[in-house]
C-alpha cells in the first residue's frame, strides 16, 4: 500500500473529490483526517464508508478560512496523531450565484469570500501542516484550468486558484527539501457543480473536452495519491493538469 503508516489531512473532504481522495488514501494505508465545515452529519457518510472497509479515519470540524479554527484543528491532529505526513488542500468555494456574473456585477465582497477559502485557507492549512511535518512529507494543492488558460466564466474562482498556483511554486522552494508542494489543476469533473448546468450546457462542456466526457472523482483521487506518495519523491513545485485535454483548445 502506497501510504502505509502515513497520516493525511484532506480538507473539504465531506463530499465530492475530497471525499474520494479520503477514501482512496485510507484504502492505501493512511490514517485520514476528514475535514468539514458544515457539520458532523456531512462527514459521517465518508467516515463510515472508510471504517466499514477497515480503514483508519476521524473527522475534525474546521473553517479553513479562520486562523483560530485552523489552529484548533491542528492541535487536535497533533494530540491524536503526533504529526502529519500529507496535506491535500481540497477545500474550496465555487459559488453558482457569481459564476456567470459579468465584470460590472462583481463586487469586492465576492472576491473576499472566495479568496478567504481558496487562497487564504490553502495558505493557513499549509502553514499549520508544515509545523507538524517531517522530511519527506507532501502538500497537494488544488487549482483549476481556467487559472492557467483563461475562460469567460468563473472570474473570481479562477483568480483565487491562480493565487494557489503561484503559492504552490513559492512554497515548493521555501519548504524544500523537507516538504514537497505540488498542485492539481482540474478541468470539468463530474461533481456537484454539474448540477448548475442544463442539458445544453453539459453537452457544450463535453464537446470542448477531447476525451468527450467529464472527469471522474476517482481519477482526481488517483492523481492526488501519486503526488502524496513516494512515487513522486522527485517532483515538487509542479502544476499537473487533469482535464481530458480541455486546455488544449
Image: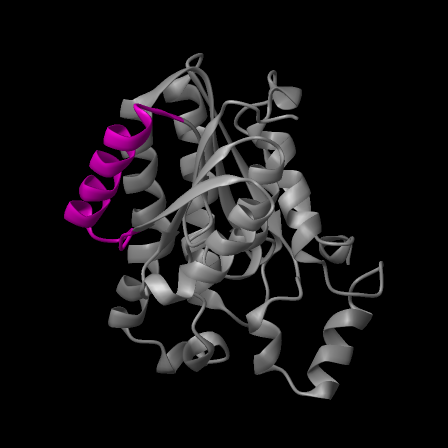
Above/below status of 95 relative to 79:
below
- The mark total stands at 0
The one nearer the camera, 129 or 202, is: 129
Inspect the magenta stretch and tell me whether residue 136 lies in it.
Answer: no
Camera-side residue: 226 or 142? 226
- Which percent across, then down, holds residue 11? 41, 48
Residue at image position (25%, 43%) is 73
Q: Quadrant of the C terminus?
A: bottom right
**Closer to us: 226 or 36:** 36
Tell me the quarter of the picture where residue 144 sits: bottom right
At horizontal 73% and vertical 87% (from top left) the residue drawn is 199
Left or right, 85 with reference to 245: left
Q: Residue furthest left?
A: 68
Q: Is residue 67 magenta?
A: yes
- For the rendered model, the colour scheme is one colour
* Spot occupied by residue 46 in the image (x, y as percentages of width and height): 50, 56
Identify the image quadrant of the N terminus: top right
193, 174: nearer the viewer: 193
Q: Residue furthest right?
A: 211
Q: Position of residue 213 (x, y in %)?
A: 80, 65
In the shown orientation, is residue 194 left or right of residue 70? right
Span shown in magenta? 61-84
Predominant secondary structure, magenta span: helix
Q: Position of residue 177 (x, y in %)?
A: 44, 12
Q: Is the residue 213 above or below the residue 51 in the image? A: below
What residue appears at the point 59 percent right and 80 percent down from the top-left corner? 195
- Picture residue at 39% right of the left edge, 28% below the top: 171
**Would you place residue 91 above or below residue 122 in this image?**
below
Amino acid at each position: 500500500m502506497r501510504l502505509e503508516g502515513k497520516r493525511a489531512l484532506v480538507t473539504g473532504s465531506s463530499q465530492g473529490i475530497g471525499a474520494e481522495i479520503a477514501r482512496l488514501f485510507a484504502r492505501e494505508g493512511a490514517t485520514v483526517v476528514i475535514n468539514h465545515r458544515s457539520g458532523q452529519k456531512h462527514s459521517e457518510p465518508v467516515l463510515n464508508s472508510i471504517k466499514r472497509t477497515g480503514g483508519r479515519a476521524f473527522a475534525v470540524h474546521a473553517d479553513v478560512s479562520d486562523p483560530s479554527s485552523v489552529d484548533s484543528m491542528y492541535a487536535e491532529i497533533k494530540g491524536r496523531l503526533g504529526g502529519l505526513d500529507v496535506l491535500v488542500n481540497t477545500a474550496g468555494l465555487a459559488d453558482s450565484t457569481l459564476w456567470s456574473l459579468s465584470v460590472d456585477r462583481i463586487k469586492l465582497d465576492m472576491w473576499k469570500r472566495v479568496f478567504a477559502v481558496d487562497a487564504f485557507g490553502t495558505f493557513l492549512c499549509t502553514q499549520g501542516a508544515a509545523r507538524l511535518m517531517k522530511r519527506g512529507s507532501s502538500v497537494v494543492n488544488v487549482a483549476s484550468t481556467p487559472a492557467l488558460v483563461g475562460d469567460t466564466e468563473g472570474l473570481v474562482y479562477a483568480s483565487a486558484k491562480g493565487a494557489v498556483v503561484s503559492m504552490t511554486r513559492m512554497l515548493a522552494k521555501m519548504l524544500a527539501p523537507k516538504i514537497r508542494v505540488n498542485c492539481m489543476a482540474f478541468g470539468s469533473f463530474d461533481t456537484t457543480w454539474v448540477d448548475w448546468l442544463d442539458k445544453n450546457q453539459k453537452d457544450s462542456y463535453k464537446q470542448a473536452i477531447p476525451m468527450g466526457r467529464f472527469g471522474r472523482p476517482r481519477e482526481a483521487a488517483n492523481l492526488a495519491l501519486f503526488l502524496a506518495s513516494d512515487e513522486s519523491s522527485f517532483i515538487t513545485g509542479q502544476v499537473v493538469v487533469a482535464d481530458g485535454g480541455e486546455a488544449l483548445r
